[in-house]
Amino acid sequence: MTSQVHLPKISSLLDKIPGVGDSEFSIEEREYILDLAHNKTRQAGQEYAQQMQYSVLEDAKVPASVGRYRAYEYEMPQDQQPYEIDDNIIRHKFNRLFEQDKNSDLEDGHSMVVACSAQLNIDPLLELQDNPAYDDERIVLFVCGGGFIKSDVPIAKWYYLRMSQELGQRLFVPKYSVAPKHVFPRPVHDVYTAYNHLLARGFKQKNITLCANSAGGSIAVAMMLLLNGCKRPMPSGCILVAPLLDLTMLQDSWKRNENNCVLLHVPLSNPKCLSRIYHGPPENTDTESLYETFRHPLLSPLFSTDLSCLPRLQIQVGEHDVLLDDSRHFAQKLNQIHGCFPECASYHRHAELITYPERNHFSIMRGRSQLDKVYGNMRRFVDTINMEKKNTKP
């Protein structure tokens, strides 16, 4: 039933995407086809793959000529401290996880994927280790999306390695715990711990770029707000691709783009809303209480009243994405805080906003030419941050 309901919508949308035809689909698409959207079943993916005349691989094997990756487990750093959060209820939830972690009682523990493109030419004995491969090595901490119900899938390794190649850096991807088994704040705690783990292993904060997409954007920004509250060093910069930053889902673009995007609007009043699945059963379910709960900055960073702590950001989003206004309003708030006005060139603003005409939440990362644009903008941002850090006097 799932494929009959959703596949025609995705197929028709793909037909309307300029420049995305058979010749435009990259190897990432052929592997990613099993995971078209968060609510698609494996069967739906297989049917769609057959419809598009692609062969479906049971496992996405990546040849060594492309790169290598491995998953590893790690423990919370010994010097990690309890959380400092104003909200007593939220602080209690976070510190309960902290105590469990400290006592090695945290269910499912912590794990990470490290990905290294073959083009980086790093010593094979060091490329998959979790410590710097050379002095002042720059890396990317990537928080992948997945609608809060998945944080890593085998076929995503192609994207990790492509990003590693394009940015010229190794990628570290925390496999954060997901709903409904693990609800907020566990995913944020996992990513916060992953960042501290990299610092403990010898990476410098000035050499770490945070990157996130979709639901991972909410987790990544919440993690940075925690770093500020706990007086921990910030990453050098942050890249967000089609981020979800308002879990109330009340931004106008949800309605404006509902016929142009693959994401379905399920309101907070519905228990099946992903925001509620991520949070877990709320204490009060009346409308006013629900919106008050989900406006908390660690759930919906768009509503934070203290964004001045955040590093330089680049935000990329499609103009047909239902999350478009999340990005627009977030960038606007950041630039106003830092005195960057509309007349400033976008790349001179604290938050650089890049929009893509006729691209939605799915198509922003589809097709060779589009991927070239997305990765090209990422590379320019990372190079700029790197140059600024070099020119900054101690």
Image (spheres, helix red, strand yellow):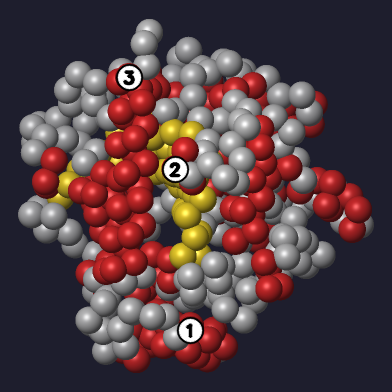
Q: Going from the N terminus, do you reach mark 2 or mark 1 first?
A: 1
Identify the element where label 3 is drawn: helix
Report the quarter where the C terminus lies.
top left
The residue type indicated by label 3 comes to Asn
Disc number lying in front (2 or 1): 2
| x then y, percent, for residue 270 | 78, 67
**What whole-number distance in Å separates the C-alpha atoms at marks 2 and 1?**
31 Å
Q: CA distance from mark 3 to mark 2?
A: 17 Å
The residue pinned by badge 3 equals: 391
Residue appearing at x 57%, y 88% in the figure = 5
Crowding at dot 1, Cα within 10 Å, few <14 / some 14-19 / many 20+, comes out as some
Horizontal and vertical percent for residue 68? 17, 47
Q: Are marks 3 and 1 in contact (CB under 8 Å)?
A: no
Give the CA separation, mark 3 to mark 1: 45 Å
Q: Which residue is mark 1?
A: 13
Depth check: give the residue in front, 390 or 277: 390
Q: Nearer the viewer, mark 3 or mark 1?
A: 3
Q: Nearer the viewer, residue 137 or 69?
A: 137
Q: Residue at x 69, y 30 (%)?
A: 306
Residue 281 horizontal/vertical position (percent): 76, 52
Q: Is disc 2 placed on a helix, strand or loop?
A: helix
Q: Earlier in the sequence, mark 3 or mark 2?
A: 2
Q: Is residue 191 above or below residue 49?
A: above
Q: Earlier in the sequence, mark 3 or mark 1?
A: 1
Circle 2 residue: 347
Between residues 283 and 367, which one lies in front from this camera angle? 367
Residue sitting at 47 percent across and 38 percent down?
Answer: 348
Tag 2: amino acid: Tyr
Q: Nearer the viewer, residue 43 or 306?
A: 306
Q: Quadrant of the N terminus?
A: bottom right
Under circle 1, the secondary element is helix
